[in-house]
Amino acid sequence: MNSLLLIVLTYFGFIIAYKTYGKFLGRKLFELSNKNKTPAHIINDGVDYVPTRKSILFGHHFTSIAGTGPIVGPAIGVIWGWVPAVLWVFIGSIFMGAVHDFGALVISSRKKGKSLGDVTKDIVSPTSRVLFLLVIFFLLLIVIAIFAMIIGKLFIMYPASVFPVWMEIPIALLMGYLVYKKNMNVKWLSIIAIILMYFTILVGAVYINDFHIPEIFGLQEILVWVFILLIYAFIASILPVQTLLQPRDYINSHELLVAMALLIIGLLFAHPTISAPAINTAVKGAPPILPFLFITIACGAISGFHSLVSSGTSSKQLNEEEDSLTIGYGGMLLEGALAMLVIVACTAGLGDAAAWTQRYADWASASGLGAKLGAFVDGGASFISHIGIGGEFAKTILAVFIVSFAATTLDTATRIQRYVVSELAEGWNIKPIANKTGATLFAVITALLLALAKPGGAGAMILWPLFGATNQLLAGLALLVITVYLAKKKKPIVYTLIPMIFMILMTGWGMVYNIIKYAGNSDWLLFVIGIIIMILEIWMIIEAFKAIKNSKKIKETIES
């Protein structure tokens, strides 16, 4: 199939979905109204709760949910063929992921900006709140540790990206100051900021393309980067959102749009035929396509982490309730569009069928970090080269794009983990980590300990096999909470119930598969953690069905 035709068809489908299904959900299911005051206006503390214009908040939300997820997942998932990957991203984004993100944002906004874990207490039960927050804490612990490791690895793989990525911080700080303190025009500042960003990329590609940090106190380069990145994450997550987080994410969103535009324009000129097989189930060493397609490709279709962003930071900055349609539902569809570009880059941009097979010969070669990121960078760079941008500059553009989004996920995850730790600490009366500084310090220290768990920094990666399954189980649990919320509001639940059942079944199946595998390999750490997560999930499902049953009893009592 022609790659350009595939992009046109899927993008057209996303637009139709937003204007029909998305608006239907907003109007009939959630009954959005700007008459409902958002937490940003009710609380407005100038740190976390800040009324934010829709375009800026969209940039923050999208860059936070995107990260490397819609790149890594699809880049691996195409090993089973491009057709399953495309169908899952397209259908999953419209009917599952966007509904999930949208629902979490609306519910949190109507519950004073509390995280989805915290509002579970009111929607389901007090017990389920603790269960949900523990699952979230575990997931974010892995996210912070792993993303710090991934960014460090990317800096080593693409040293030309180091200068532009770090220069983005002073550019963002200056932009935030000029917008919020000097009330300057955000449109012109955005144009200037993105020009400066691409200038730094050019400088990095030409002049600073061999940068490496030496070992410090015997620590390998990647561990030095982990220390630096976690210090940055600590500072970024306690600063007021409008100081760094918002402007940086806003710049990142424009950087993404420019990168996507370059890829699409290059695709217009190149429009190669997809060389990967349509379906490829006989993959050496790979887990079965069912259920692991739905676990491997998370971001870009549906991801539990998105509910944490929707209810963790975005709901606290929502200016008007009706903005949630664009930010929640629309943001997920744009991520699906990015995932589609990644699929095309990895299936049509690498060359002929022989070149693709060389990259995806077996699971071991396709699932390595270097292979999955390299496939996208090389495939995407081949598209961009058709418009006269080639060599190191094209690869640096895409490398900075990946690192910038991974960094956004890192500092957003740290901020959300701070909320989770504070909520748990307040409930258990642990005062030292209930405040902003203590909770953030606890978040980064625990992540650092995980990263240092094994020599050479392998500690953060030992839990990677559980990350995908835990993330998708969280998506199922988030849909479960949204479903209970709608049931109590006497709204139709079919739109969230079907995705919820599907995600819990698929990811539960995958988790059981992994647990059996861990036991067979005598990998008892992963085995025990997997068992704990399964118990938390089953327990919370029981609590949710009790809540639905009780709500029906209350309704019957009232009617009688």
Image (cartoon, rainbow, N blue to C red):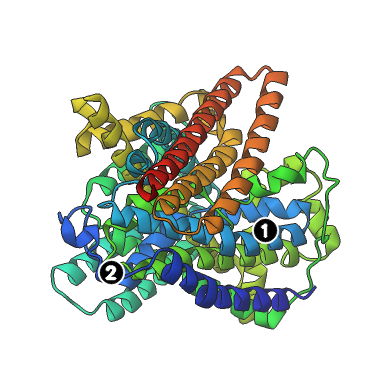
Toward the front, the furthest residue is 560
Discs 1/2, front:
2
On screen, residue 16 versus residue 85, left or right, reads left
Residue placed under numbered mark 1 in the picture: 88
N-terminal label among 1 and 2: 1
Q: CA distance from mark 1 to mark 2?
A: 32 Å
| Location of residue 240 in the rendering, given as x and y in whole percent from the top left corner | 21, 53
Q: Is residue 208 visible?
A: no
On the picture, is 453 further left or further right than 423? Answer: right
Question: For the residue marked with disc 1, what is the amino acid?
Answer: Trp
Q: Secondary structure at mark 1?
A: helix
Residue at position x 56%, y 44% from top? Answer: 472
Amino acid at dot 2: Glu
Q: Quadrant of residue 204?
A: bottom left
Q: For the point 61% across and 59% down, which residue is it? A: 92
Q: Which one is in front, 348 or 135?
A: 135
Q: Where is residue 380 drawn, in percent x and y?
A: 63, 66
Q: Which residue is mark 2?
A: 320
Residue 206: give x, y in percent of width and height: 49, 65
Q: Is residue 248 left or right of residue 135?
A: left
